[in-house]
Amino acid sequence: MRKRSYLGRISLTPTLLVIAAAGAIPLSAQLGAPATPQAPSSPPPSANGPVSSMGGNYQGSVAAGQATATPIDLSLTDAIQRGLKTNLGILTTSESVSNVSAQRKRVLAGLLPNLTGDYTQSYNRVNLAAEGFHFTLPPGLGFSIPEIVTFGSVDTRANLSQSVVNFQKLRNLKSADVSVHAAQLSVQDSRDLVVEAVGNAYLLIISDMARVDAAQAQVDTSQVLFNRAVDQHAAGVAPAIDQLRAEVQLRTDQQTLLASKNQYEKDKLVLGRVIGLPPGQRFNTTDRMPFSPLNGITTEDALRQAYANRADFKAAEEQVRAAEIARSASVAEYYPTVDLTGNFGDAGVNVGSSHNVWNVTGALNFTIFDGGRIRSDIEQADSTLRQRKNDLGDLRGQIDQQVRTALLDLQSAADQVAVAQRNQQLAHETLAQSRDRFTAGVTDNVEVVQAQQSVVTADVNLISATYQHNLAKIALARALGLAEQNLARFTVH
């Protein structure tokens, strides 16, 4: 049986960190043991800040599926659900969570054991004379020392390094945990922004449809009046100028109808991009969202809901907390650390004659002088913390402004709808009376044309006021947070 011997060494040595241009050099590195991964001295990465407004990514998407020949019916709820799956804004924010989580794992790796292995086999042939060794032995000994020496070795090791006590890394890990939570909250805020973007695009299509219907009704009216003017002129009871005016009004209304239809189709393309419909997919919107007053919401209640529910506000609070912990991690750079390194394996001339060898080293590291590096890290962390607090304060004011603006727009739009409804009623009554007067030959068609223009203006004003009122509901739903749930409460389909 092969005899095996055991060789080992245990040492626990406090190490004074020697200041060099590159920083401190731990004892484990001097001994050639694998270096323990060091956490960065700067604060760990935090989640991206909240998106202040829509645009950019929220107007794009990653299209899903293939276009079908049959148009699909699309309700507002369906459009929102599609947007939450395919909108580029929420996809980008979700990827930022993966990025922050990966960086958190990197910080955690600095606290976990680092285990590596290596196998080394070497063969050497050395000319001792060339190295300056000259051996002259007395005669009669029966042996001599050759000038050329051949030898080899085998070394197999498992290497372990572990940070035993490191307050900086522990606090950086806690800061990274908070940053991951902030990033997750940013995803929820992105959902609210997607709901707002989809809702706005859907409302615009509804408004376009109303404008197309109004323009078509006006064309029908103008066609009837033109036909009547032609008949009256042919009968000799109306001058040619009446026929010309009626035809000009008809052509003008037809042009308005064509422009309205074109805008309607273009805005449908915008909605398709926002919600990720396949290119070329035709669809019909099924919700109309007529005017429905929204009452019973006070400014104080709205602000209380907003601060309690807004995901971007919660994310900003978490970013402040992460910056505070990161600042304490910078202070912890002053604290001593304890690291452990070791290896265990076999070493020998060859595998058959190898012996167990091992080494364990504990190192106590502490700073004596670092040239102000730690102080600069603390100052940088203080600056980051102040910026996070400033961002939080600004966001608080922004939320207050958004809530108050949405409530003001909501009330103003409701008042405008009431006025526009009455004005539309009066305009249609005026047009009816003008048509009767023109048919009876009491007046020419100038009065009719003017009445028609009043009807067009009244119809457009009512459509715009209703659109603005529904738009204010979506803005309020977003301002209060939990936009998807609030929008379902505020809107009537």
Image: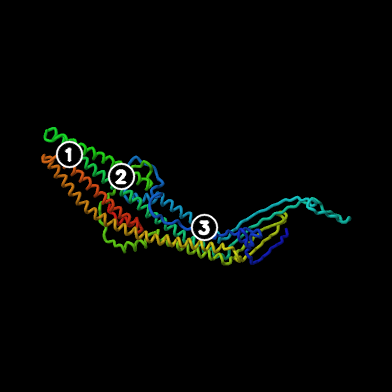
In the rendered image, residue 258, in percent from the top left (x then y), is placed at: 27, 39
Disc 2 is placed on an element classified as strand
Q: CA distance from mark 3 to mark 1?
A: 76 Å
Disc 3 is placed on an element classified as helix
Earlier residue among tags 2 and 1: 1
Q: On the picture, is 101 further left or further right than 299?
A: right
Which quadrant of the rendered structure holds the N terminus? bottom right
Residue 388 location, quadrant: bottom left
**Which amino acid lies under the numbered mark 1 shown in the image of this protein?**
Leu
Mark 2 = which residue?
284
Labels 2, 1: front one? 1
Q: Outermost residue toward the right?
A: 140
Q: Which mark is residue 225?
A: 1
**Which amino acid lies under the numbered mark 3 shown in the image of this protein?**
Lys
**Which amino acid lies under the numbered mark 2 shown in the image of this protein?**
Asn
Residue found at x 33% / y 48%: 201
Residue 14 location, quadrant: bottom right
Residue found at x 14% / y 43%: 434
Q: Is residue 268 above or below residue 244?
A: below
In the rendered image, residue 56, in percent from the top left (x then y), is placed at: 40, 49
Towards the viewer: 442 or 43: 442
Mark 2 and mark 1 residues within 8 Å of each other at the beta carbon:
no
Q: CA distance from mark 2 to mark 3?
A: 47 Å
Q: Which mark is residue 105?
A: 3
Towards the viewer: 198 or 468: 468
